[in-house]
Each structure stands twice: as C-alpha cells, then as structure tokens.
Amino acid sequence: MAVKPGDFLLVNYTLKVKESGETVDTTFDSVAKESHIHREDSTFGPKFIILGEGWLPKGLEESLVGLDPGTNKTVELTPEKGFGNRDPGKMRLVPLRRFRDKEYPTPGQQVEFDGRPAVVRAVGAGRVQVDYNHPLAGRTLVYDVSIDKVLENENEKILSLIALRIPEVPKEKFGLKKHQSDLTIEVPEEAFYLSGLQVAKKAVTSDLQKFFPDIDTVAFQEVFKRSEPKPELPATVAKPAEVSPEKEEKAEAPVSAPKKPRSPAKNKEASTKKPSTGTSRKRAKMGSENQR
C-alpha cells in the first residue's frame, strides 16, 4: 500500500554528503560503526515520523509519497530541498569569556549557545566565531531510504508519540486506558524524576489532540507500586568441623590434674635403677632343663 501524507511511518535511511562521500547520519547501528559516527549514547533503529510534518527535510518527505513499504530508494537533494543555503548573517563573533561556564571551544565543535545549536568555526584572541547555520546547510545530500513499517494500530501510534517526547523510557512501559474521548496514560516509575517531564507531558498532550481529534482529555497517572519483598533464604546449619581421629581422641580424653614435678633425687633414682632381670633368669632356667 503506497504511503500518503498523514501516515505514521517507521523509516530507515543512510545520509551521505555528495561533495565528499562522507556518511553523516544513519538509522543502522552497523553502518554507524563502519563510518565511525557511532556513539554509545545514541539509539539506532527506524525513525518515527508523520509524513508531511517536516520531521525530515522537505524534499525527502516529498519523495516518500506514493512509495510502497519495503521499497528502497535513493534520493538526491539540493541545498534548497535539504537544509537550505548557507546564510552569512547567521555567523556571530562572541567574547571567549562567555564560554567560561562551558567546555573550551574548538573549531568544528557543536555547541548550544543562546539556546540555539551552533558550530564553532574559529577561535581567536579573546573571540569565538559561531555559526548558527545547520551543519549540512549548503550541501547536496544523498539519502538511501526505505519505509520499514506503516503504523496502523492506534495504541502503537500513541506510544510512538510519547516516545518522541520522552525518549529516555522504553515506550512499552507506558500504559494506556481510553474511555470514549478520555485517555489516561500510566507513567512508569522510571520517568517520575526526569528533568523536564512536565514540559514533555504538555507536548504529548498537544500532539495527541492534534493528531487524534477524538481525544478531548489526556490524564497522566503516576502509580507507585509496592515492591515485592525478596524471599527469605532458609537458615543454613553450620556443619561441624571435621576432626582427625587422633585429634578427636585427644579432645575426648578427660583432662587430668597436672602432675607435680618429681624431685631431683627421685629422678636420679629412677634413672639409675637397673632393668629387671626376670627375662634373663627365665632363659637360663629353660636352658638348664634342656641339659637334663
């Protein structure tokens, strides 16, 4: 089914600059690694758009109209159809001291200055040249693009709009309850303390009421659930330490009172006492009987 303006789409693409052949953007993780533009804090995967809303360059969106899902297409965009021509009036010289609370500027660095994205072009003696033109302004762009999926399910569309405004939390963790023209969004605990959450809620509400005329009221429900207690592990009985037979015998032997040390005289007497001659006598008597 050919797509049309207003469709909710998931789009894959790889973007190159025609003049240099450099890959500057992609939705594919593998391509980003091969092109050395991969970032650990970036999320790769099909990009969600509503066709005709200007979330992609105008020329690219126009080329998607009438395209069938799964069909690959290569689109070349002139600057006028891409990110516009470079405007010298968007170049500014600002004092270097205004960067004291920021990272020290270097040429080519992308920064946010005065609430707008900009690129540092040059750093001089006490002054910095910043460029508010889009980084791809004035470039001819080449897109390899395809439509991965057309979203038809209403809940899937709503969750995709939520993820657009609150990308830090997986969209599957949000719950949806709709009753006639009232929609309740259950917010997971992961989103409770996000910076700018209230602003994001307002943006989600505006998006939903714009693209879903049948939704009049949007309520956000924050539910704190009782955490399940961890099961107690059974108490372990300590095994008795193994004792060798000799040690065990010694351990079981009754403890006798310490013996008094013998006097030197008795020790001497015991040492000089002759061994018993009973054995030698017996041998002699037995010899005399044999002689009889």
Image: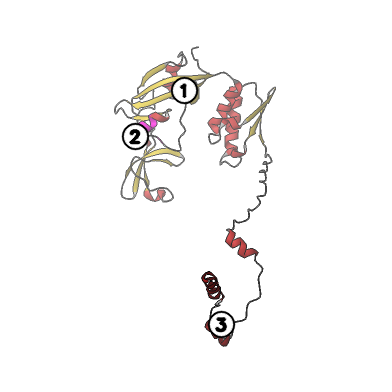
Q: Residues within 10 Å of mark 2 (few under 14, many from 20)?
A: few
Residue nearer the viewer, 59 or 175: 175
Q: Which residue is mark 3?
A: 270
Q: Along the line of sight, which residue is nearer the eye, 15 or 205?
A: 15
Residue 140 position by quadrant? top left
* Mark closest to the chain's N terminus, 3 or 2: 2
Q: Secondary structure at mark 3?
A: helix
Viewer-closest of 30 and 287: 287
Does dot 2 land on a helix, a strand or a loop?
helix
Q: Residue flagged by tag 1: what amino acid is it?
A: Val
Residue at (47, 28) in percent of width and height: 45
Q: Tag 2 or tag 1, which sits nearer the N-term? A: 1
Q: Which residue is rendered at x = 65% and y = 24% of the image?
A: 215
Q: Which residue is mark 2?
A: 88
C-alpha gap between disc 3 and disc 2: 120 Å
The kind of residue on which mark 3 rests is Ala
State the image quarter where residue 191 is shown: top right
The residue identified by callout 1 is 11
Taking the magenta stretch, the answer to whether it contains residue 236 is: no
Assign a secondary structure to mark 1.
strand
Residue 201 image position (x, y, % from top left):
60, 34
**Colouring method of the image:** secondary structure
Q: Which three-letter amino acid code belongs to the residue tagged 2?
A: Pro
Query: In the rendered structure, which segment of residues is drawn in magenta?
Result: 31-38
Q: x%, y% of residue 196?
A: 56, 40
Tell whether 184 sits left or right of 90.
right
Neighbourhood count class around disc 1 (C-alpha, 10 Å): few under 14, some 14–19, many 20 upward: many
Q: Can the viewer see residue 147 in this picture?
A: yes
Locate residue 178: give its quadrant. top right
Give the percent coordinates (x, y) of residue 175. 64, 30
